Image (cartoon, helix red, strand yellow):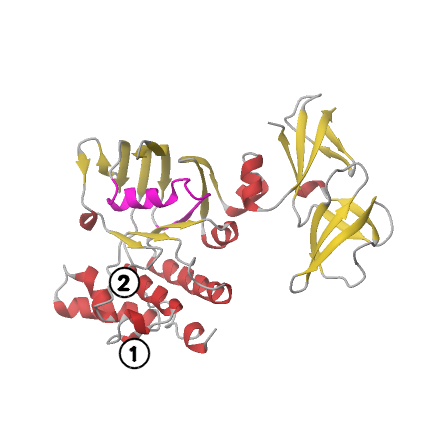
Amino acid sequence: MSAEEVGRWGPRGTAGVSFASALAFDEVEVALGGRTVLDRFTLHLVPGEIVCLLGESGSGKSTILRVAAGIQRVDAGTVSINNRVVSGHGVHITPDRRGIGLMFQDFALFPHLTLLQNVLFGLRRLDRQAALAQARQALRRVGLEDREGDYPHMLSGGQQQRLALARSIAPRPGILMLDEPFSSLDARLRETVRAETLAVLRETNATTVIVTHDPEEAMLLGDRIALLRRGRLVQIDTATAIYRHPVDLNAARFFSPLSEIEARVREGRADTPLGSVPAPGHPDGASVIVALRPVGALKIQPSGEGTPGRIVSKRDAIGVDLCEVMVAGLERPLAVRQVADAGFVPGCDVFLTLNPEHVLVFAKE
């Protein structure tokens, strides 16, 4: 990763402030090619918040952005901006009249236009001097002010991402929509670009929707996370709440790998080979899945109290041990992620302690 890509962002606090808009989807339905893509989708965003749309491929995330921007018409339901219906039965306000900035996954830069001309493209309603001032301010914020006469093909991938961001914020839209904005960047560059992009979004104060398939990214960026499945909103909450209290087992699986143990409830608790855990809300005799995340649910110790186990595999990951531990009574080893310890090696006998606060219990489907 070059210093040019990492250190060339402009001063924070200089992006230019937008008048944030409220955005509402109510019972929106979209069918494409005979397949339902959005199924009575409902979501309300308050002005200035950042919401991440999270879900598997085909869950409808990008379609939601296209619907909001006016690129895709709806078959039923309404989309409203500041309580004004912009999509609905007999209503379809064109994209250029919605006050929405859209940043595509592939950046969609104009190869025949210079960087400055790319950013000016969305500022045609302003007079020349005002447009130039806003375009250059946006380029300066992303650290490309000295490249305004260059063309997109002369930029690195990270710089192209910054140009696309500058173009989307230059008109100071009330709503910003970003479609997988970091997916084309390598892992080392992504972290820095993501942090700087979030700083820019906070400065603009625009209501923002970010599409991602990466749970960690959604948790880092969003004020709230909207989890989608087959075109419907499954759960929406803060990152902490949705991680700690996923609505169902599939939602929990989406946020992290799980070790899953089948159990039966007795007197409000589920018995497992690791001990019993609270199972509130599940009736006696019910079959449940006790789900353990790799981080927090289990602690490995070389001796002492706990359930005996044996490490069957171990991988090092930059100061972290990724261990698989076999326990009597379980068909599959348990995944445990913890601070690196050279004393733990495959074949080593250990003791496992369960932390019920990090254990999830779901009804067996």
Q: Using the image, tell me which numbered label, if any, was put on residue 146.
A: 1
The answer for how far apart the CA atoms under marks 1 and 2 are is 18 Å
Residue at x 35%, y 69% (from the top left corner): 142
Query: Can residue 147 be seen in this snapshot?
Result: yes
Where is 259 relative to 336, above or below? above
Closer to viewer: mark 1 or mark 2: 2
Looking at the image, do the residues carrying marks 1 and 2 touch, with CB atoms under 8 Å apart?
Answer: no
Give the amino acid type for the residue marked by disc 1 in the picture.
Answer: Asp
Give percent across and percent down for residue 4.
41, 77
Residue at x 49%, y 45% (from the top left corner): 238
Give the amino acid type for the residue marked by disc 2 in the picture.
Answer: Leu
Q: Residues within 10 Å of mark 2 (few under 14, many from 20)?
A: many
The residue segment tinted magenta is 48-72
The image quadrant of residue 251 is top right
- Outermost residue, right direction? 304
Badge 1 element: helix
Judge whether residue 280 is colored magenta. Answer: no
Badge 2 element: loop
Using residue 304 as the reference point, say whether residue 182 is left or right of it.
left
Mark 1 or mark 2: name the one nearer the start of the chain: 2
Pick the front one: 47 or 279: 279
Residue at x 28%, y 57% (from the top left corner): 18
Residue wearing tag 2: 109
Give percent across and percent down for residue 228.
44, 39
Q: Residues within 10 Å of mark 1 (few under 14, many from 20)?
A: few
Give percent across and percent down for residue 331.
74, 38
The image quadrant of residue 37 is top left
Pick the front one: 247 or 230: 230
